[in-house]
Structure formats: structure tokens, C-alpha cells
């Protein structure tokens, strides 16, 4: 599933991560907006209120109205402080909170869309890659059936049912491997590996049949398969490419 991993990693690095960083930066901008409101609105009001408090302390009392001038001054100061608290608690907090809520909602929606699209893309890619792997496996198995059908021809008990399998197995093997090679863009190493895998199993199973049925001609065919396998290994050395292990799939 090489394509699946590569596509998934590409989407993670080039789509998901940049989008997450963008929204992290957007949340930082919300905090900056809150600080801007505090600097542009709250700080001037606070400065004016401090000046007003200083003026109230320095202002002389008018005894005729029982210091009503200072009372009014302090009343204005208290009112400004209340307004200041309202700005600090409501305006600054509200602006920053609403901004973060909007960013969070948009982020949630965008990430859901990205994940859905990611799942769709990976499903299609992985399905196609799975199809290619199945074509390789079908080609290798069909080739194995053909090789075994040829190997058992010297055995009278097995030759009649095996003979009709040679032509269709060969056709299926050629078609499946060609599809994998040209439609799925499978590497030459992968195709040769499927052939080598089939030859290895044909040698093992053919040798077992030759010993079981005491067939020298089957043993000779198996020896030919061994020579073909050796030739294939030598042929693949410059690429470089190695034949898959028999215990794994081609």
C-alpha cells in the first residue's frame, strides 16, 4: 500500500498541517484584536479617568454647596470607572471570545470537509492500488497453475484434468501481469518478482509431485524451472531486483 501511505502523508503535510497552522494563527489574531481594542479604547479611557481622579483630588471644595463640585467630580470618576470595567469585561472579552468562537466553528467545518475529501481520495487510491496488487497476485497464481499443469503432463493420472488448464492459465497470467504493468504502472521488478514467485512454488510443488508419483520427466521439468529461476535471478542483478520470498505474496 505504498501509494496510500505516500498520498496520506502528502495530504497531511501539504493540506492538513498548513490549514491547522492557519487557524492557530487566526486564534492569535483574535487575541491581538482583543489587545488592540484594549489599547485603542480602554487605555485612553483609563488615562482620562486617572487624570479626572487627580483633578478631583486637587479641586478646591465649594463650601456653599457643601462641596457639591467635588461630589460631582467623583461621581463622574466613578461612572467612568464603571464604563471602564464594562469595556474591559464585556467589550474586550466579548470581541476576543466571539472571534475565537467564529474561528473554531469555521475550523471545525473546514477540517471535517478536508477529512471527508481525504477519506474519499485515499479510498479511491487504495482501491486502485489494491486492484493492482490483486492483478499481480492473480497473474502469479495463474502462472503457477500453468507451470504445474505442464509439470504433471508426464503423470498419466494428472495429465488429462491438467491439460485444459494450461491455455486459460497462460492467458490469465499474461493479461493480469500486463494490466499490472501498464495500467497500474507496476515496476518491472514487481512483474519479474511475480514470475519468480510462481517459478519457486512450481519447483517446490512440482518436486513433491515428482517424488509422490515417481515421475522422472516431471523431475526434469522441475529442473528446467530451476534453471529458469536461476537465469531470472542473474537477469535481475543489474537492475537491481530480488525475487520475493515464497512465504510472502508477490
Image (cartoon, helix red, strand yellow):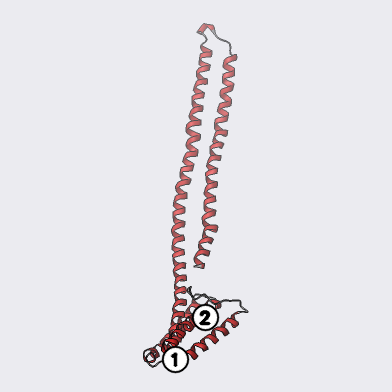
Task: Estimate the x, y position of residue 55 in percent, counting from the top left.
Answer: 59, 17
Residue at x-position 49% and y-position 22% = 79
Whether residue 67 is situated above or below residue 75 in the rendered picture: above
Whether residue 26 is situated above or below residue 80 in the rendered picture: below
Q: Which residue is mark 2?
A: 196
Task: Estimate the x, y position of residue 76 in percent, counting from the top left.
Answer: 51, 20
Q: Residue furthest right?
A: 238
> How far apart in space, not on screen, are marks 1 and 2 (Cα)?
24 Å
Q: Residue furthest top?
A: 64
- Sequence-first disc among 1 and 2: 2
Q: Nearer the viewer, residue 138 or 38?
A: 138
Count of marks overlaid on the render = 2
- Residue 215's label in the rendered image is 1
Residue at x-position 58% and y-position 15% = 57
Q: Residues within 10 Å of mark 2 (few under 14, many from 20)?
A: many
Residue 170 in view, yes or no: no
Secondary structure type for disc 2: helix
Residue at x-position 44% and y-position 84% = 208
Task: Estimate the x, y position of residue 72 in percent, counting from the top left.
Answer: 51, 16
Amino acid at each position: 500500500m505504498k501509494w496510500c501511505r505516500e498520498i496520506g502523508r502528502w495530504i497531511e503535510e501539504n493540506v492538513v498541517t498548513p490549514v491547522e497552522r492557519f487557524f492557530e494563527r487566526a486564534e492569535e489574531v483574535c487575541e491581538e484584536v482583543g489587545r488592540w481594542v484594549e489599547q485603542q479604547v480602554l487605555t485612553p479611557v483609563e488615562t482620562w479617568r486617572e487624570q479626572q481622579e487627580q483633578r478631583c483630588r486637587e479641586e478646591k471644595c465649594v463650601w456653599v454647596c457643601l462641596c457639591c463640585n467635588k461630589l460631582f467630580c467623583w461621581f463622574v470618576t466613578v461612572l467612568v470607572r464603571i464604563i471602564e470595567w464594562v469595556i474591559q469585561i464585556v467589550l474586550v472579552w466579548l470581541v476576543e471570545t466571539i472571534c475565537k468562537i467564529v474561528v473554531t466553528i469555521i475550523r471545525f467545518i473546514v477540517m471535517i470537509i478536508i477529512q471527508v475529501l481525504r477519506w474519499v481520495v485515499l479510498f479511491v487510491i487504495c482501491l486502485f492500488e489494491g486492484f493492482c496488487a490483486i492483478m499481480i497476485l492473480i497473474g502469479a497464481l495463474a502462472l503457477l497453475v500453468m507451470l504445474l499443469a505442464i509439470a504433471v503432463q508426464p503423470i498419466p493420472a494428472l495429465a488429462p484434468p491438467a491439460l485444459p488448464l494450461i491455455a486459460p492459465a497462460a492467458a490469465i497470467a499474461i493479461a493480469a501481469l500486463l494490466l499490472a504493468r501498464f495500467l497500474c504502472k507496476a515496476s518491472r521488478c514487481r512483474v519479474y518478482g511475480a514470475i519468480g514467485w510462481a517459478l519457486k512454488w512450481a519447483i517446490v510443488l512440482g518436486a513433491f509431485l515428482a517424488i509422490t508419483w515417481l515421475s522422472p520427466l516431471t523431475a526434469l521439468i522441475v529442473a528446467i524451472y530451476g534453471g529458469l529461476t536461476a537465469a531470472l535471478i542473474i537477469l535481475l542483478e543489474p537492475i537491481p531486483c530480488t525475487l520475493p520470498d515464497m512465504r510472502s505474496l508477490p
